[in-house]
Amino acid sequence: MAKVKTSFFCQHCGHQSPKWLGRCPACGEWNTYVEELVQKEDKGDKGTWRVSTSQKVANKPRAIPEITYSEQHRTITRDKELNRVLGGGIVPGSIVLIGGEPGIGKSTLMLQVALNLPGKVLYVSGEESEQQIKMRAERLSTKGENCFILSETSTQNIFKQIEMFEPDVLVIDSIQTLQSSFIESAAGSVSQVRECTAELLKYAKESGTPVFLIGHITKEGTLAGPKVLEHMVDTVLQFEGDRHMAYRILRTTKNRFGSTSELGIYEMLGTGLREVSNPSEILISQRDEDLSGITIGAMLEGNRPLMIEIQSLVSPATYGTPQRSSTGFDAKRLNMLLAVLEKRGGYKLGVQDVFLNIAGGLKVEDPAIDLAVCASIISSYEDISIPHTTCFAAEVGLGGEVRAVNRIESRISEAEKLGFKEIYISKYNTKGLNFKQFNIGIRPVAKLDEIFTGILSS
């Protein structure tokens, strides 16, 4: 009879302890330890991923010049947004974890990708039956003759089917529903998630088959399960968005094969997720006339330039204490810009309520929209509209100076492509910039005063 051992695991970070603790020494969270049964037995190869005899030779250390390397060709999917966030396509043998809130569209995204991938795809679902997945596939209006569905939660049974089927891509929905017979705890526990992921990781690396894992997130917005789960996988993607809005954002938080600052945008329709190839047209609202408090800023998400709309509302404080509210923009940075405007520009914003909104539900961290935010606030304060053909791309310093930003050429080109007539940038960005290659008016400025006297006085 196998020896059964009881251990305690932190449900937040996965730290293991032989006894119950009130506070986790690793992550500092309170009341997160849960008792789990861990069965110690010799796994062997029974029920797990088995490799050939030639692959079981012990590894020996080799010098770097002796290691042969051949560039692996990525699998290019029909989803250009997914190709972008993965760094150019699916890497053979990679394991990708996709997290998101319930109902955001993770299963729809992966089923849509699986239906359009070349080669055989095995879609393993532990949450839905085969009939439910069939209903969703019919809504996507894709035949998917190479996509095969398996409704199973036992990893041992899954690997038996994998050996017979030999898929080119494996999709697991979701990792929290899988259960290994070698661990005597419930599905979704720290030890089960870690063990199942380790078995899938071994399969992906030894067979060269890419694996996609769908994961749940906690109420804090982090991936459920131990933190080691994110360290084990090659790529971590976050699927974000408001369930009440049509647009979704696929963001990279970890990528061993590409950039971690790429962004993919989708629109949720009745027939599935539609790729948004030009998000600037969506992030800029359509209006018939110029309104005060609205400006356009040129930002970057990874290698993609975006034109976003900043909306501000400045009004006298009615209840004594002025309110400061921002949606999609850092509240501390907003307070800093308001202090700069009051100190360097002379605007009495200390007795005004200030509300700031980034249109489209996007969260912006690029400091290049500082100038657009300041122009938007003053436009609402003075109740003077800024022409909708004008945009901004510059950072604002504490001294009221307009600072340079990176990749200004791509920002100007995006503004020109979308039909803007002029763009305000820092004069320190003009060094080495060829004005003749652009058909848009470039307005270099050094101080905030030049913006206000040039635009608001016109």
Image (spheres, grey):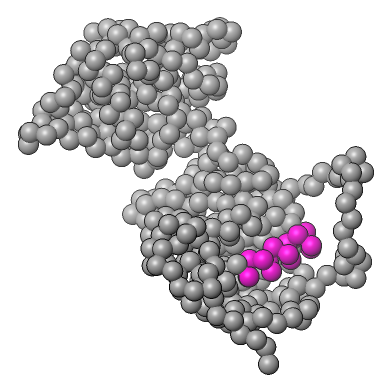
- In percent of the image, x 47 and y 66: which residue is there? 11
Quarter holding the C terminus is top left
Q: Is residue 37 above or below residue 412?
A: below
Q: Is residue 394 magenta?
A: no
Quarter holding the N terminus is bottom right
**Residue 96 rendering spot, x and y as whole percentages:** 62, 56
**Residue 330 rendering spot, x and y as whole percentages:** 35, 35
Given the current orientation, which residue lies at the most extreme left position? Answer: 319
- In percent of the image, x 62 and y 51: which residue is there? 235
Q: Quadrant of residue 227?
A: bottom right
| Residue 22 shown left or right of residue 16 in the figure | left
Q: Is residue 157 above or below residue 313?
A: below
Q: Quadrant of residue 193?
A: bottom right
- In percent of the image, x 46 and y 8: which residue is there? 427
- In percent of the image, x 49 and y 20: which residue is there? 405
The residue stretch that appears in magenta: 195-209
| Residue 58 shown left or right of residue 232 in the figure | right
**Residue 171 rendering spot, x and y as whole percentages:** 63, 64
Along the line of sight, which residue is nearer the eye, 123 or 98? 98
User: Taken as a whole, is the magenta stretch helix, strand or loop?
Assistant: helix
Instruction: State the count of labels.
Output: 0
**Residue 415 rendering spot, x and y as whole percentages:** 47, 22
Q: Is residue 382 above or below residue 284?
A: above
Q: Is residue 421 above or below residue 11?
A: above
Res 179 seen here: yes
Res 189 seen here: no
